[in-house]
Image (spheres, coloured by chain):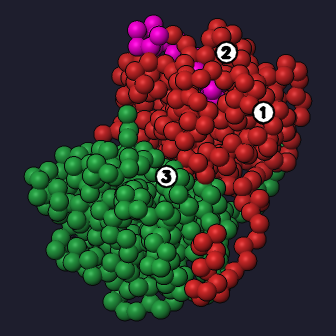
Chain colours: A red, B green
Amino acid sequence: MRKGILSKYKDHLPVSPNTPALSLCEGDTPLIPLENLGEELGIELYAKFDGLNPTGSFKDRGMVMAVAKAIEEGARSIICASTGNTSASAAAYAARAGIPCFVLLPAGNVAMGKLAQAVAYGAKIIAISDNFDVALDMARQGSERLGMAIVNSVNPYRLLGQRSASWEICEELGDRPDWLILPVGNAGNISAYREGFDYYAGLGRCSGLPKMIGVQASGAAPLALEREFPNPETIATAIRIGRPVNGEKAKSAVKDSGGSFMAVEDREILAAQSLLASKEGVFAEPASCAGLAGLLKLKNAGKLPQSIKVVTVLTGNGLKDPNVLLSSIPPIEPVPGEWSSLEELFRR
Amino acid sequence: MRKGILSKYKDHLPVSPNTPALSLCEGDTPLIPLENLGEELGIELYAKFDGLNPTGSFKDRGMVMAVAKAIEEGARSIICASTGNTSASAAAYAARAGIPCFVLLPAGNVAMGKLAQAVAYGAKIIAISDNFDVALDMARQGSERLGMAIVNSVNPYRLLGQRSASWEICEELGDRPDWLILPVGNAGNISAYREGFDYYAGLGRCSGLPKMIGVQASGAAPLALEREFPNPETIATAIRIGRPVNGEKAKSAVKDSGGSFMAVEDREILAAQSLLASKEGVFAEPASCAGLAGLLKLKNAGKLPQSIKVVTVLTGNGLKDPNVLLSSIPPIEPVPGEWSSLEELFRR
């Protein structure tokens, strides 16, 4: 029976007898072999589909840890500044634990679609007539003044829980892959993977770090392009971040693993999303597809070694953000329900 | 490593050496203990969350079987009439298998949101300027005249694959639950559960059928209210069906298990959806919540036995259909990003 990561990995996480057994059965997401695309690329390719977590993104791995520890440490509510996957995950685990979750969002960026989940999970949503940094500052003040637990990426338990994805990959493959390629926004996930592989290597469960390739959208690529992005812009909203909180950790992960950062264009991300869905039957949100876009770009540049084992991380479900895709659909002209009008279409 | 149901249950499904090893790692969905609601209801309650299948619904269990057998039997394309979960699942497995998928939809009911997945997976979508029955008839003709495999619920392999959900429940609980309560639209799923429990009972893996309770929306309740519904209507679109294809099978499942059919109002379904998300952190599409709505209704009527073990089936992910929920959100008035304006809100 799947019991979630606090139970499965209790010996490797800060789980004490006083930590509540919080779980939405997160983790244990499939490592899907991408045989069609792997063949085209000349590699052994897998997708770690973390979009099949309970709230549809990898955030659940860290959030279950953060919320459980918040309760253990006496917090009676949690708070975050977010308009996306973080708020959905925070709201779900708070609901499960029976404590209030406050979501602060910058009013200018209220994307109602992205908030559907937080609303469903019963979060208390407060719009701030200011930018994200102010919202985050207010969350910090709520934490310091009222003892609410802040569960933004400044919360140290988030990354500890997120390491579980690397452990699952090692267990499924019997070792680390040759390469791990994944989207990089706030740079927390790549840092968590690094720490997870390091930890498992220390236990003799894998042979060190895979080469880690962090892919950013070219409109929000402070690490890949080594310059500031005061106004980051990309259709891949989950990685639309100009100042990554975990930037330094991510740099060392890339350096120590012999990897690199790279940037891809929005159109390359969308092409990768379409390819992944139409060639493999896997629908991931745009940001998730940055890794595959990176592989395609490396292949075209003659820089992709052949026959290596590669895992690309799909961080979120395609159903999280269908609007980008829907806006590209041409209108469908109806035809009469008669065989004569259909036969030609079928034979095309 | 999760390999999908054709591999996991190859000894119990029509899998031959010639059946392609098709998989999106479907199945093995979590059986989530609903302790908060279970306590309120006085029962031991679990949710089988089939919304965490690869395309977000239980349809994947039957579709992987149907598409694999279609290929084994020589079909070079598949076809279905659908505007919902069936077309998403069909399109995904066809993409994975590298064959075309034709989706016929009645033009009057083109809900673009519901089609985002089929579009992403590269299905060939044809709108028919007529009703669903005509679209289904055209799909049948495509099948008969051109050898396309029809994967609507008339395809017998669908229910065979769907039995796998009952097997997983038995494996997790060690036996069948006392009750299984689930939404009923076309009545295929309740029939598949019945056949799955019967099959496992024959192998000595469970002690017969649970009491099976089929819940319909009151605007589309031909089985629960025993009358015709020529124009079915409900917000739970996945069960908006007036003439269930598998109605007779479902009647016998209910009768033989000592169960019943019941109808719930749309507002009861929405209340159950909200309760499930806000008390347990589980977001399921409206139709999925009919089972919980039924339990609440039985409890209020004093007809729910205490301390029994109940599984309710959540057939689809809440992200499939967020619009019903979004339309109910009042506008959020922004407040200034200052502690003085926030403190009161936090303390409320």
Image-quadrant location for residue B332: bottom right
| Local crowd size for mark 2, using a 10 Å CA cut-off: few (<14), some (14–19), many (≥20) | many
Identified at 18% across, 51% down, the residue is B175
Which callout, 3 or 2, points to the residue nearer the camera? 3
Indicate whether residue B117 is drawn in magenta: no
Report crowding for label 1: few under 14, some 14 to 19, many 20 or more residues within 10 A (C-alpha): many
Give the amino acid at mark 3.
Ala
**Residue A314 in sight from this viewpoint:** no
Residue B259 in the figure: left or right of residue A204: left
- Which residue shows up at 22% across the image and 49% down it? B11
Q: At numbered mark 2, what does the secondary structure look like: helix, strand or loop?
A: loop
Tell me the residue that label 1 is attached to: A264
- Give the Cα distance between marks 1 and 3: 29 Å
Q: Which residue is mark 2?
A: A259
Q: Nearer the viewer, residue A179 or B216?
A: A179
2 and 1 marks on the same chain: yes
Q: Residue A127: image x %, image y %? A: 77, 48
Chain for numbered disc 3: B
In this view, the residue in front, A143 or A136, is A136
